[in-house]
Amino acid sequence: MKRMKSNLKVTVSLLTATGLLLAGCGGKENGSSGNSQQGADAENLGIYYSVEEESFFEPEDFLPLEAGEFCDRERAFLTKDYVSYFSWVLNADNSGLYSYLQVYDRQQKNWGLFDEKGDSVFYEGESYRIAAHTPPFGGLDGRMYQVVYGEEKSYLAEINGEKIQRIAGELTDKEETLCIQAESYKYADREGRFYLADNDNLRLYCYDANMKPADEVAVPGMVYGILQGKEGEDVCWYGLDARKNPVVKRVTDGKTVAENIEGIGTEYRAAMAEDGSLYFADTQNMWKYTDGTLQKVFAFVQNDYLLSEIYGMECTEQGDVELLTDMDSELVLLTLHQADSLPEKKEIVLADYSPTVQLQKLIARFNRQSREYYVTCRVPDEGQEWADFQQVINLELSNGNGPDMFTSGLLLDVEDYAEKGYLKPVDELVDDPEQFGSGVLEDQKIGDTLYGIPYECSFFLSSYRMEDLGDRTAITLPEFTELVENSDADIIEENMGGVDLLVYYILYDNDDTTYIDWEEGKSHLDSEEFLRMLEFAEKYADRDNTDKKAFAMSSSMTDISTIKTIYSSFRGNASLIGFPCKDGNGIYVSTNAVYKNAATKNPGGVDTFLRFLISEREQKRYGMYSSRDMIKDGYGSVTLGEFPVRKDAYQKKVTKEVRESYQNDFYGTQIPYTDEMTDWIYFIRDHAKPDNPHIYAVYRILLDELTPYFDGSISAKEAAEHLQNRVQLYLNER
């Protein structure tokens, strides 16, 4: 059989990063915030932090990108008043490089945009152009600086929102080169004095507040940044020494302030508090260095903060530590406030054989943001087989025990468990059913009651050549057979035998009672009409898998890129209206869901998590995490989720996939997405039905009784009689 509906996911291989996720698996649009309180780490140092998150969801959405353009690289910077986000933009053929600079005002909560194709900026009556092809930088003085161009000269300027606040000083050709090249780093101290690091030549150039040269310092290794406690105090640089170990030294005399700071990664950030204490952070941990002692004070991974990169780090006047990070493929500002204690949280257990990357990240976000609950994932023990794990979970559930929640692939008979009261209905958790794609909620209903909260979905459909279908938006079985017989097709579908052809193209539709009336329990498989369908299937089955002309192609669509395969198969002219169907379209949606154990001791916590699971914000995050993000985060072949179930999140995923397709097509060998393709992608979402065909229940009977017919051993009439008797017996006993 080509396909059987299944919620089981298979993980091929996991890199270290996945282990980190499972360790942690255990808002608003822009500037959305969340608070959590976390401990330092397993060492229990008695230091606790309340962590506030402010996430900036997809800054690229605010860019006026044209069709075929995409953001290739991004950098971000942090100051007291601003967050800046710098994007390099390419077009479809990887040419036409230009840039955008977005500046987020932390007080006004809005974005400003600089763009090298835009109008000039005026300052004191003179016209200047912002150098949007090179990143700006933030100073310890809380200001943001950028290179600007006059008519003939270049300058370093303080920028404020979308304006030039002041011209700091004129740049020489050498200084301009240092400012704009990627290998140099630019800084300003609390007095507004400037520093340019030339890491190729191991030099740190020092300037006054007007960009006049003050000193040239030889450094032993790479400079990452400068540190200064208070205005008027010594300025230090931090980075790596000659042996590539983290180090902090004074700029004026080169005296070492901190060294032998073992355990910190080579890619790290640092900040200095007003009392002179040093803070270091890499993507794993944060440390505090005081009086020559290095102490780990916060473990990011252990506390579900899965950071990909730290862009910047600052100590505030209030004694907080701020980190601008790339977390969950988003730009996120973390503010850590030292706290006296931790709140008590109640544990909720979710059983899942192989959680997707997106689901693990979602659980980590829930654990960070919830002040009352935390979710842990129960997965098979090392060496435990899938079937054994499933059996244990189902036995616990049937005995009134087990985890608080289950993912759909684990339960052997959802309908039976619901009837026996083992599962709790969850209808009240869905506030707006209209926000979900067609058939999504129905796929998890038993009767009229919703038992599973769907969080991702995939589709199953058939496609055809447009010239064979004409302008049809749906097709019935009689229309289908007539079109096939009047075409020049040799087979219905490549590699599809007679039994599967009957299953998918003739018997899959539950609403068609011509051959089996599932509601009434009546089989008509010995009718003349079914005999004709047997002969039709025998004629158009693909027996020898040789090169023949096919009429259709069925597809399981778990990713948007599947539509490219379909279009390629039909040479750029396809109709994706689905299988033959009595009413509507034979497009079927299959969902993965989470079920609530009726015996849970934390029903309120389960409800809170399930609402979080299908919230607009989390569904968008779930859908927008792509294979490119997975590679960026360092994963190998792991389980990647499918389509989000909410319409708004689905649209976000499609938009991102189309945008990133140009970026992923490095060699220019892929066919591009067209407007027609994206129209079909939305058509599929809006015309799907639940993928719960009753025919699967008798597939083994079909295989047993019809294989001899397709082998030529018995007649169609004899096969139909045998089939009718066995299927009717099944219906009588059901």
Image: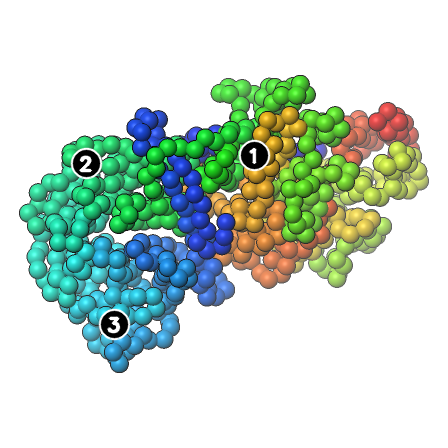
Compared with 661, 96 (above or below) is below
Mark 2 vs mark 3, foreground winner is 2
Percent from the top left, x then y, of residue 313? 29, 47
- 366 or 187: nearer the eye? 366
Amino acid type at mark 1: Gly
Percent from the top left, x then y, of residue 718? 90, 30
* Image quarter of residue 280: top left
Q: SS for tag 2?
A: strand
Image quarter (top left, top right, bottom left or bottom right) of the N terminus: top right
State whether residue 464 appears in this view.
no
Identified at 83% across, 43% down, the residue is: 511
292 relative position to 309: left or right: left
According to the picture, the residue beneath numbered tag 1 turns out to be: 605
Q: Which residue lies furthest to the bottom in this view?
A: 125
Amino acid type at mark 3: Tyr
Percent from the top left, x then y, of residue 277? 20, 41
Identified at 33% across, 26% down, the residue is: 44
Compared with 568, 373 (above or below) is above
According to the picture, the residue beneath numbered tag 2 turns out to be: 290
Mark 3 vs mark 1, foreground winner is 1
Q: Which of marks 1 and 2 is nearer the N terminus?
A: 2
